[in-house]
Amino acid sequence: MTLKNKLNIIDSSELARQEEKISKKKALEMFETGYLDSLEAGTFESLAKIHKYLFEDIYEFAGKIRDINIAKGNFRFAPLMYLEAALINIDKMKQSDFDRIIEKYVEMNIAHPFREGNGRSMRIWLDLILKKEMGVVVDWSLIDKEDYLLAMERSPIRDIEIKHILKKALTDKVNDRMVYMKGIDYSYYYEGYVTYKTEEL
């Protein structure tokens, strides 16, 4: 089923192509205009602003908390009734060192606050925290797809794997456009488009 969109596209493959094209252009714009650096690192508000910027030309729900329960495979993300409380708690989590930053990233992934586009938005959000707190970002091109996905699946129970994978890929090239865009490409060419099971409320 194709998500309702502002482009009035009913073919899912075409929507995926247009979503990639538009959101990548917007992601680059965020970087080049300095918009990203104006955001407060590590808050849900900043994540919502990133999501809105990326997808506002495509979806009405850009930047808005989802109003459905979603799952991927056998994993259910935070139930809607607890989602807002979870986001408040994530905002309060410390981000003073690498381990705490990744723990915050893992918790935000469990929350999965948006109907679509969580991975892309959260990757940019994570790099913003790392950049402001530690002067580094992730070079996503150094990360193996399968290792990352398996580590993220296991991260709610055991986060040592995802910490190890991300730590090995850190770089101090925080203002490098190519490094930044590798992170955007990663969302499409490595992770692909996620099919969620939804439960309309």
Image (spheres, helix red, strand yellow):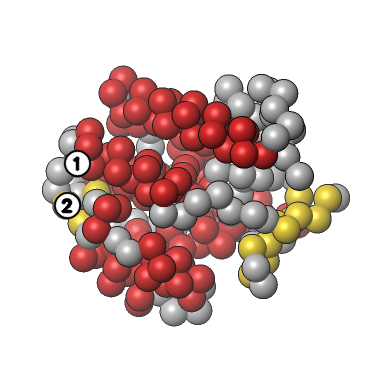
Crowding around mark 1 (Cα neighbors within 10 Å: few <14, some 14 to 19, many 20+) is some
114 over 78 or under it: above or below: above
39 over 32 or under it: above or below: below
Q: Position of residue 198 (x, y in %)?
A: 76, 55
Q: Secondary structure at mark 1?
A: loop
Q: What residue is disc 2 on?
A: 171
Q: Position of residue 75 (x, y in %)?
A: 64, 69
Q: Position of residue 112 (x, y in %)?
A: 59, 54
Which quarter of the figure has residue 116? top right
Q: Secondary structure at mark 2?
A: strand
The reply to whether discs 2 and 1 touch (Cβ–Cβ < 8 Å) is: yes
Q: What residue is disc 1 on?
A: 174
- Residue at position x 73%, y 58% in the image: 197
121 over 61 or under it: above or below: below
Q: Position of residue 162 (x, y in %)?
A: 36, 69
Separation of marks 2 and 1 at Cα, in angstroms: 7 Å
Residue 200 shows in the view: yes
- Residue at position x 62%, y 33% in the image: 15
The amino acid type, in three-letter code, at marker 1 is Val
- Residue at position x 47%, y 29% in the image: 21
